[in-house]
Amino acid sequence: MRIRRAGGVLAVTLALAACSASADRPKSASAKAPPQPYSRDPYPSTYRAYPGVPTLLRNVTVFDGEGGRIENGQVLFADGKVVAIGQTVDAPAGATVIDGQGKFVTPGVVDIHSHLGDYPSPGVQAHSDGNEATAPVTAEVWAEHSVWPQDPGFSRALANGGVTTLQILPGSANLMGGRSVVLKNVYARTMQGMKFPGAPYGLKMACGENPKRVYGGKGRIPSTRMGNVAVDRQTWAKASAYKRKWDKYEKDGGDMPDRDIAMDTLRGVLSGEILIQNHCYRADEMAIVLDMAAEFGYKVTAFHHAVEAYKIADLLKARGTCAAVWADWYGFKMESYDGIGENLAILEKTGACGMIHSDDANGIQRLNQEVAKVLSSARHSGVQISDEAAWKWLSLGPATALGIADRTGSLKPGKMADVVLWNGNPFSVYTRPEKVWVDGALLYDANDPKRRPVSDFELGQPGSGDVK
Amino acid sequence: MKRALLLLAATMLATPALGQTIAITGGTVAIGDGSQPIEGGTVVIANGRIVAAGRGVAVPAGAQVVDATGKWIAAGMVSAPTDLSLVDSEGVRESSDVRARETPFNAAIDVSVAVNPNSIKIANERVLGVTRAIITPSAATSIFAGQGAVIDLAADAEAVTRPRAFQFVELGEDGGSNAGGTRPAAYAMLRDAFAQAQDYRRNPAGFDGRGKDALLKRADAEALLKVLDGTMPMVVHVERASDIRTVLSLPRDYPRLKLVLVGAAEGWMVAREIAAARVPVIASALADLPASFEQVAATESNVGRMRAAGVQVALASIGASGGDHVLRQFAGNLVAITKVPGHTGLDWGQAFAAITSGPAEAMGMGADFGSLRAGRRADVVLWDGDPLELSSQPVAVWIDGVAQPMRSRQTDLRDRYLTPTEGALPKAYEHH
């Protein structure tokens, strides 16, 4: 952002130089006020990594998250970062050494689709903060302003699921539901304290049944799929005009155009700073959304819940758009009627970008098992995918689609030490996380009740501090 | 071509096979009664029933022999409580016979008349190892949802094993809501309904169950008599420890009630009382969140702790978004937590029983189906590995001793799109 602003200043200088050469220009032009860009980060992250100790995991099977596998390998992390992985690594004297005979080490799980915090437990009406279902376009809302950092669900995702990073999205009632936020799965007193430093924002969009049902039910547009696309296109056309106005102002200065918080977000999408995370089930609708994106000059980073992605895996590959999917959910609504357990496998076989997601406070606790089910369906359909390759669906894939793959998602030296030690093969139903580190800090240990987070809500209630 | 297909289908359906004797030999046998798997075992089926299962079982002369070397021969899964066969897609209201939103009737509702064995989910779940289901309506205008049924998932028209198998009742948060807003209102509704049913029994002719303002219709009163007499189990959905206690106290006033609990997320807190009352529980396996104020103490150890206290526990398919067959994943997780310090899970035999004989036992039908013990309905699944392990898949399914087709709409979709690009003709021309 700083670089962008510098460019703007430079451009203004050049414009002024051009003006001074033209004698008959009105004088006011040279007196233009300099541009004052609005803040792209008004609710900045205050997350700080908790202290850790240099740790060597040895005698473990490692899935590095990038498709690699090391038997009897070693992983070293220190100062919150992965230092080295390999058959053997040089550990500093005094490093904590954990022998993991029979155990597996993986990068922490990244869930690209969660509503923890904005639909927290208990799921009472007072906690229903995920859908601003009062207008079909609410690009002005930000999920982070709904996130309740005391959601007990965060602890379950950590302890049972090995989830270290997650994207919290607005719901799918609206065509443009608002901004998402990416969190580290570490309890804090404030949302800002959980916020993944520097992660780009996403814009949640939705096609299909939900928006047309919600607004059709209120007797207003959209009440049909064609209505969905019409409202989207109208909005993108407005956003394009807004972007032109603000781009010019941030380049040239002058009178500041009116601010529109919703349009800020859409402008961010059109300029590539904000990533589109698009709820969409049906293959034919995804194809229309891809053309709409081309029409207005933005990119769909990922389709979520893409139950029919397998039908257009080749198209998704060609357009470079990912599909984030469940393993096997199907049939619960008309647009999920054609769900099959091989969805992710067909994407992989075709060379398209796929990944697993939860959208569910229970499902997020077993994403490793969801991938195991995909592997099973795949192999029984003649599609061979290795365990280590499949781990990409759990960490590097979603990290890439969140724009944070340079910092997490695999065990590459220099990346955040977001690490899970599993008590067996994580693709077995009989396996659970034994230890979970976030930025090198041990935040869950199955053997130590003191390393088991208890949210404020659960404190002092029956079962507080229990295994969950 | 079409005629050939029809003929094939006719042959498949017409094959009586009921009299057929089948011996599935040399596999690991999972009986489903709580016992541990038996390696190198044989299962013999005749007349649609299990003749014998285990090691050293002789193959009868003339039996069709299926070699199960390297495979597992297991009881089929039983899903409970579920809406299988009552709905094509939950979100499509027109397709659903689960919840009657505006009916004046409640306890009289009988889902067995709506069972549709051609619903695509039946075949989808059958090929994934579910052989029988305990189906139930959902309550809407009352605490009484109506009468559920037991069905099989076979590819034939005779789906109903037992109609009117139980009455489903809501007595927790949902019950309070349906009764007008509170738990006390739910109990007022329950007690008044039982009193009216008894009025009806004493004087049917004098019973005012047809009037516009009648709180209970004649048909509802009649249905509740079977509950009061204990000839029909009363399956009660409650989660909170205090709600469970209140339900367990009902037999003081209605001594013949045959109670079954569903949900029971806080059951572990009152496990000894449930065990003492000998009330079976069909519990949510992996509910571990305070999803509501009635599940504040939910933990994955719930089932294990209840079992350890002597409660007869089965696993509910509630929350199985991937389909009823996800039950086996639930069961596997309860084995997994036995390795986690502080957790109480189930051993393999208990876990497998909880998704096979468990629901049948809870309904009082364990002698009829749910396990591979002699005399039970021959609902058998041949797996290529441990049925609780995610890498395994069924390779053959028998229901009532009849071999089932291993295709479903999901396998058809998969085969059509395994290569997503179109060939010489559109995808619509790729079918059997």
Image: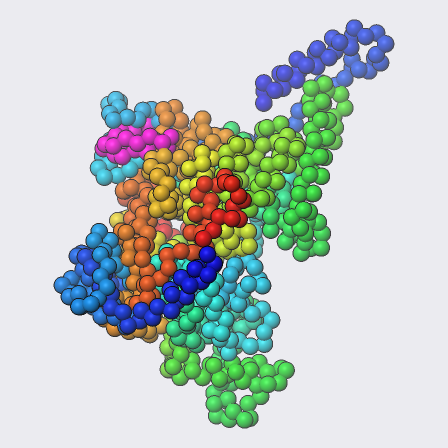
Left or right of residue A241, residue B174 in this image: left
Report how many numbered discs are placed on residues in the image.
Answer: 0
Dominant SS type (magenta): strand
Residue A78 colored magenta? yes
Which quadrant of the figure has residue A389? Answer: top left
Note whether B304 is above or below B146 in the view shown. above
Residue B27 colored magenta? no
Which quadrant of the figure has residue B7? Answer: bottom left
Toward the viewer: A243 or A8? A243
x, y (%) of residue B205? 54, 93
Note whether B352 is above or below B364 in the view shown. above
Identify the residue at image location x=15%, y=66%: B58
Note whether B134 is above or below A455 in the view shown. below
Which quadrant of the figure has residue B153? Answer: bottom left
Note whether A115 is above or below A125 in the view shown. above
x, y (%) of residue B62? 20, 67
Part of the protein shown in magenta: A55-80
Identify the residue at image location x=28%, y=26%: A86
- Tell me if residue A84 can be seen: yes
Toward the viewer: A153 or B101? B101
Identify the residue at image location x=69%, y=22%: A250
Identify the residue at image location x=45%, y=66%: B117
Q: Residue furthest left?
A: B56
x, y (%) of residue B152? 38, 67
Left or right of residue B80, residue A70 in this image: left
x, y (%) of residue B271? 32, 65
